[in-house]
Amino acid sequence: MLKTHKTMKRDPYKWVWLLGMIIMIIIIILPIYMMFKYSISDRSSVVTGGAVIPLWPYHPTIEQFEGLLEETGFINAFFTSLGVAFLTVCISLALGAPAAFSLARYKIPGKAMILILLISIRLFPDVISVIPVVETFIKLKLVNTIIGASLAHTLLSLPYVIYIAMGVFETIPKDLEEQAQILGASKLYAFIKIIVPIALPGLAAAAIYVFLLSWNEFIFSYFLLLFGELTTIPVFLRKILSWTPQHNLLAAISVMLSIPVIIFTFFVQKYMQAGMTAGAVK
Amino acid sequence: MGDVILSKITKKFGKFVAVKEINLNVDDGEFVTLVGPSGCGKTTTLRMIAGLEDITFGELKIGGKISNYVPPKDRGISMVFQSYALFPHMTVAENIAFGLKIKKIVRDAILKKISWVLDLLDLTGLDDRRPRELSGGQRQRVALGRALVLDPEVLLLDEPLSNLDAKLRLKMRTELKRIHRKIGCTIIYVTHDQVEAMTLSDRIAVMNEGFLMQVGPPLEVYDNPQNKFVAGFLGSPPMNFIPVDLVKDNNKFYLDAKDFKILIPDLKADKVKKDAKIDEELIFGIRPEDIIRIEKAKDVHEGNKIETIIDVIEPMGSELILSLATGKHIVKATVDPDIHLKVGQKMTVVVDTNKIHLFKLDNEEAIF
C-alpha cells in the first residue's frame, strides 16, 4: 500500500489519474443524483429537466413523498417488503447457522461437493431458477404469500449465510467448546453460551446481507406475487410502471426503496467487512 | 480419590496408531508428567484421560471407577489447555464461575470460591477484566483458576507454560509446584520440555512414537535410562553417543571407539558379560557433565582418558559447552568457565566410568 502511495506522488500523470477517478465517481453518483433530483421535482421540471445549471429543479417539492405516504398501495408494499425481509433473515439464520456450524466443525464426507451444490443455484441467472421454483410453489400453494416470498429469498440467501457463518465459526477455536464441556457444559449449552456470543458480529453481518438481498430482490417476488394482493416495493414499482406514471413519482419510490439500504449499509459496514474477512481467513 | 490407572490404553486414528498399549498408574496426589517430542502421543493420552478423545482399546480407571465411557464432566477432572481457551466475551470472574454456575452452586459460594482462587493465583483486582486485557501470564493463571475452583481430583495440564516467555515460564514453574503442594490434587502434566518435566514432577513418563518408554522419578530416569531414546531425550546438551566395539583384553572389558578406549569398571562388567558378546557393536553413551578436564579428575588411568582438540566453545555463563574432536567423533562436554580455553587447543579429558551408559545397537535397549 505504502509503495503505491509513494509512486503516486512521484507520478507526473497523477492529475490524469485523479481526473479519471473523479469521472468514475461522477458516473457512479450521477444516476443516484438524478433519482434524487427527479423525486423532488415539480411538474415543469419533470417535463423540461429543470435548470441545466446547477442541475436542480425550478421549484423543489416533497409532494411526491407526501403523496406516497398517503397511498395505501405503497404503504402496504413497504410493510410487505419489511415483513418478507425479516422473515427471510430469520429462516436463513435458523437454517444456515447450524448448517454452517456442522460444516465448519465436523468431518463430513463429500463436504467440498456439498459446498459447491449449495452455491450452485447462484451460479445460474435467477430467471432460470425462477420458473421451476414458481412451478413448485404454485403446487404447494405458496404463491401470493409472505412466507412463500421469504422461502424463495431464503433459497437465494442461504448459500451466502452458510459461507459467511462457516468462516465465522472456523475462526472460533475448538478448544473453547472442549473447555466448556470439561467444565460441565452440554454441547447445546456450550453452543448457546460460548459459540453464539462470539460469532454474533459475524452472524449480524450475514443477517444484514440477507436483509438487503431480500429487500432488493425483484425477479422471484415478481413471479410469486404478480397476481395477488401482496406486493413488495420492487414489484410495486414495476406495477406502477405499467401505467406510465410521471418520472418524479417513480423517482420518489426509488428513493424510498434506497433509503433503508443506505442507512443500513452505512451503520453496519464495519460488521459487514468483519464478517466477510472472517469468511476469507481460514 | 484421585488416582488414575491406564491399562493397555491404545488410540487409533484410522489406521494410524497414536498411542500404543500404555500402562501407567498415577497415585492420588501425585504430580506425573508425560514428556516426549511432538507427535509422541502425550497430548492424545491426556485427552483420553479427559474424555475428549475415545479410547480405542484398554481400560481407564479414575478414582477406582472405570471411566472409558464417562462424560468429561463426571470424571472428577479438570483441564487447562495449551491455548488457555478463555472465553473472550466473559470477564475473569465470569470465566472462573462458568463451571460453578453449571453445577448450580449458590451465588455466595461462587463469589467466595472466586475470591479464594484469585487470591491463590495472585490475580486479585482483575475480576472485571476481559481476557484480551490480560497479559499472557495472567491469562494462564485465570485458566488455571477456572480449573481449580471445581475442586478437581485430577488436574490435567496440556503444555500450560509453552506460550509464556522464558522468564515467566520459570516463575510459573515455581508457582505450579507451590500450588500443587497447597491443593494436593493429582496432576497429570504434558510437556515437550524436559526441563519442566524434570523440575516439576514426582515421576516422569517418557513417551516416543506412541510408546511409553520409561516411567520413574526424574533423577532415576535421568541416571538410569532404559534405552537410547530416553537417554538422549533427557538432558541438555544431550548425551553423547559413540559407536564402539566390545573388546576383551587381559580379562578386562574395553569399549573401543577407534580413537580411544574406555575401560568398563568391574561393577558393570557383569552386565556386559551377560548381555553382550565380544566384538559386538554397541553404542556408548556419556553425558556432557560426566566428561571432566584432566586437571580436575581424581581418578585417571589409561582406560578413561581421551585426547581431544577443542572444536567449538559455547559460553553459557555458569558453564561452558565444549565440542571436542577426538578424531572421528565429536563429543560435547560441559565444564566450568575458563577464559584460557581456545579453539584448536589440545585438551585431555577423563570420562567418569561409573556414569557411562551402554546400549545395544539393534533395539537400543540399555545394558547399563
Image (cartoon, rainbow, N blue to C red):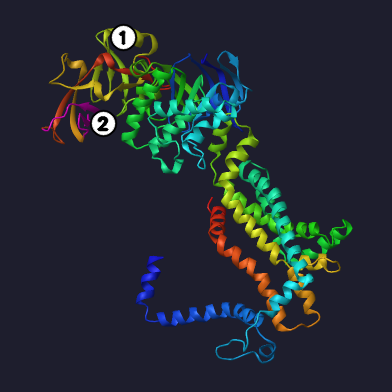
Residue B358 drawn at (x, y percent): 34, 18
Residue type at numbered disc 2: Lys
Q: Chain of mark 2?
A: B
For the residues beneath circles 2 and 1, the answer to whether they share a chain is: yes
Against A46, residue A150 (above or below) is above
Against A62, residue A201 (above or below) is above
Determine the image quadrant of residue A151. bottom right
Does residue B226 appear left or right of residue A271 in this picture? Answer: left
Determine the image quadrant of residue A63. bottom right
Against B17, residue B205 (above or below) is above
Q: Earlier in the sequence, mark 2 or mark 1?
A: 1
Does residue A197 appear left or right of residue B351 in this picture? Answer: right
The residue at 72%/52% (across/down) is A91
Q: Nearer the viewer, residue A57 or B231?
A: A57
The residue at 54%/37% (across/down) is A176
The residue at 44%/43% (across/down) is B132
Disc 2 from disc 1: Cα separation: 26 Å
* Number of residues whose C-alpha sits closer than 10 Å to that of mark 1, classed few (under 14), some (14–19) or many (20 or more): some
Does residue B165 appear left or right of residue A229 in this picture? Answer: left
Residue B190 appears in view: no
Report the quarter where the C terminus of chain B lies. top left
Residue B247 appears in view: yes
**Residue extending farthest left:** B340
Q: Nearer the viewer, residue B100 or B292?
A: B100
Q: Chain of mark 1?
A: B
Residue type at numbered disc 1: Ala
Q: Which residues are magenta?
A: B315-339
The residue at 55%/88% (across/down) is A54
Q: Which residue is mark 2?
A: B328
Residue B329 drawn at (x, y percent): 27, 30
Q: Which residue is mark 1?
A: B269
Q: Which mark is residue B119?
A: none
